[in-house]
Amino acid sequence: MVFGNSTCVGALSSNDCDDQISELENVMDCMIYTIEDMTEMETYVPTAKESCRFFDPTRFCSSGLKAMIEASRYAYEV
């Protein structure tokens, strides 16, 4: 399971960071590995493919809604 990219946020020293990593490994019963550069990850992990999909606008009958909005507006103007 891939947990994700993370850093030791709030660690005061590299020892603090090592302690946080060790604690996370114990809590999640896992091993954390660090890579030196992104080349290794780009080789084995696929990137997301983005796509845009456009849909027809919804058909909404607003004739009754307009009357309700006007009625509620007049109710508060009194």
Image (cartoon, rainbow, N blue to C red):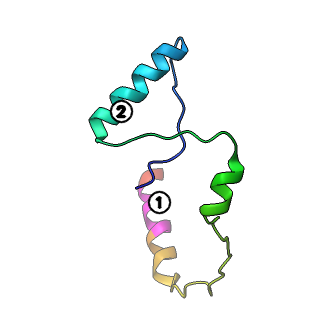
Q: What are the residue bounds of the magenta stretch?
A: 69-75
Q: Nearer the viewer, mark 1 or mark 2?
A: 2
- Residue 70 in the image: state x and y as whole percent: 50, 67
Label 1 sits on what residue type? Answer: Tyr
Q: Which residue has dot 2 on it?
A: 24
User: In this rendering, does residue 78 appear at all?
Assistant: no
User: In this rendering, does residue 37 appear at all?
Assistant: yes
- Residue 19 in the image: state x and y as whole percent: 40, 20
Left/right placement of residue 58 relative to residue 78 reads right
Question: Which residue extends farthest top?
Answer: 12
Compared to 30, does 14 lie above or below? above
Neighbour tally class for label 2: few under 14, some 14-19, many 20 plus, Cα within 10 Å: some
Image quarter for residue 58? bottom right
Q: Secondary structure at mark 2?
A: helix
Q: Nearer the viewer, residue 47 or 45?
A: 45
Please tell me which residue is depicted at 50% across the width and 86% down the height of the picture.
Answer: 61
Q: Main secondary structure of the magenta part?
A: helix
Q: Which residue has dot 1 on it?
A: 74
Q: Secondary structure at mark 1?
A: helix
Please state, as top left, top right, bottom left or bottom right, where the N terminus lies in the image.
Answer: bottom left
| 70 in the magenta segment | yes
